[in-house]
Image (spheres, rainbow, N blue to C red):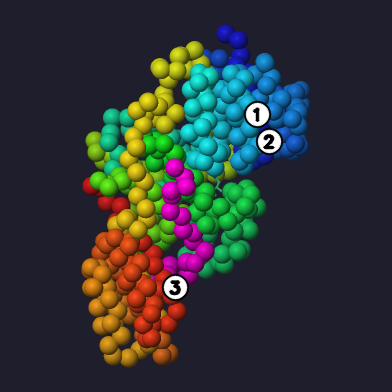
Amino acid sequence: MKPVKVGICGLGTVGSGTFNVLKRNEKEISRRAGRVIRVEEIGARRENSNCDTKGIQTTSDILAVAMNPEIDIVVELIGGYEKALELVLTAIEHGKHVVTANKALIAEHGNEIFEAAQRKNVMVAFEASVAGGIPIVKAIREGLAANSINWLAGIINGTGNFILTEMRDKGRSFDEVLAEAQELGYAEADPTFDVEGIDAAHKLTILASLAYGVPLQFSKAYTEGISKITTDDVNYAEELGYRIKHLGISRRTEEGIELRVHPTLIPEKRLIANVDGVMNAVVVDADAVGPTLYYGAGAGSEPTASAVIADLVDVVRTMTADRDNRVPHLAFQPTRLSDTPILPMEQVKTAYYLRMSAVDHPGVLAEVTRILADQGVSIDSILQKSTHKNLVPVIILTHQVQEKQMNSAIQQIEALSDISGDVTRIRVEQLDAN
Ligand code: HSE
């Protein structure tokens, strides 16, 4: 059989890893794919000293790679939006299959890309776009195909998890840890994407579409970052038996699908609460199998290359199958996607951790609990820390209530003259199986 010819666009962290692993494991990979996978051309603005591309045709014009008649599969590893979209659509238009690690591109333009691919009868594979080396796309799309999925929750941004872990374990500052993540090549080009949850929301959008068979709807995801989490919150959470993790959560309810990224208190005894550093993990709760957990490196050169190459192998194996006999892009047949709505955050029901600074005199707590009761919020526990100051920190854990009710309660509590400053609110999830 003739080798399959691949064009790699982008020779950064993931591109160089992909090139190196393809070369190093060439024999094993071709035994699996049934054909040799050969890098025919590289499209990159500059060389990368981490890989030796001598003898490979190289161009700085990535669109030329997408149009090269010799190439069967274009691997998009340039990241970003406009240029990547142009590259992918050009490749599809020229009848190439596409492998991409670009979560922003899939989350925001995936519907358009898959439609174009369907029209041209080519595949677009994106395993590396979510949780780096963890084969979570394949697990949901194929491994869990028998199930009705109830919910999924994941630590899907390594940089954010690294920051929270180092803050908790070593008391290091936010900025210092972020700088280290950037040096290690984990952080996004714009690190606010990591710490403000945008990167995680891109990945969650993709996971939810695969889990429930709905079109990609990134614009409806609720996104809250970790930059306001303090060491005090981390410590109080520990005292209450919880860890704070930056989670992407998607749950199917009768009213619609929840799609939310925010810092979350989870019981410390859950396996996912103990996923530290840059590691990622996703729990999927499904009706037949129950909860399953997927854990591994969520970023980095070769872990992400592992997912890119798995996609290459998949594409090579199914290159001759017609479109109706391939695994559909979003797990469900394109004509059978559902229009279940994404729930606005105000309609989401969850439990809460509230922290506030209260003036230390009789009746303050009674006022706070009265407001909560009026909004139908039931209290799980209260922690009041004694200090020598006039203001004392009060921490309240609540039972589940609709976000709308909690917003109103917080607004009223903040208006009390005996409460100083804002109320910190962190959502709490038990993550137990249904
Ligand atoms: N910036 C991402 C992370 C890289 O930290 O997880 C992988 O998508």
Secondary structure at numbered mark 3: helix
Question: 219 or 369: which is nearer to us?
Answer: 219
Q: Quadrant of residue 26?
A: top right
Label 1 residue SS: strand
Contact, mark 1 vs mark 2 (Cβ under 8 Å):
yes
Please, is residue 421 above or below residue 68 in the view? below
Q: Decide if residue 64 is on the left or right side of residue 242.
A: right
Q: Is residue 368 magenta?
A: no
Assess disc 3: are there few (<14), some (14-19) or many (≥20) residues with their C-alpha within 10 Å of its C-alpha.
few
**What amino acid does circle 2 point to?**
Leu
Residue 281 x/y as whole percent? 42, 46
The residue stretch that appears in magenta: 217-240
- Looking at the image, can residue 143 be seen? no
- The x, y position of residue 312, in whole percent, is 54, 25
Residue 410 at x, y = what percent?
A: 36, 72
| Mark 1 sits near ligand 1, with its Cβ under 8 Å away | no
As drawn, 197 above or below 313: below
**Seen from this angle, which residue lies furthest top?**
1
Which label was assigned to residue 11?
A: 2
Q: Is residue 402 left or right of residue 236?
A: left
Q: Give amino acid for label 1.
A: Ile
Q: Which residue is mark 3?
A: 232
Q: Is residue 432 visible?
A: yes
Figure quadrant of residue 9: top right
Task: Please say if the residues under marks 2 and 3 sit with CB atoms less than 8 Å apart.
Answer: no
C-alpha separation, residue under disc 1 versus residue under disc 2:
8 Å
Residue drawn 27% across the image and 88% down it: 363
Residue 8 got which mark? 1
Q: Residues within 10 Å of mark 1 (few under 14, many from 20)?
A: many
> Which residue is drawn at the image coordinates 67% and 39% (left, top)?
12
Tell us which disc is closer to us: 3 or 1.
1
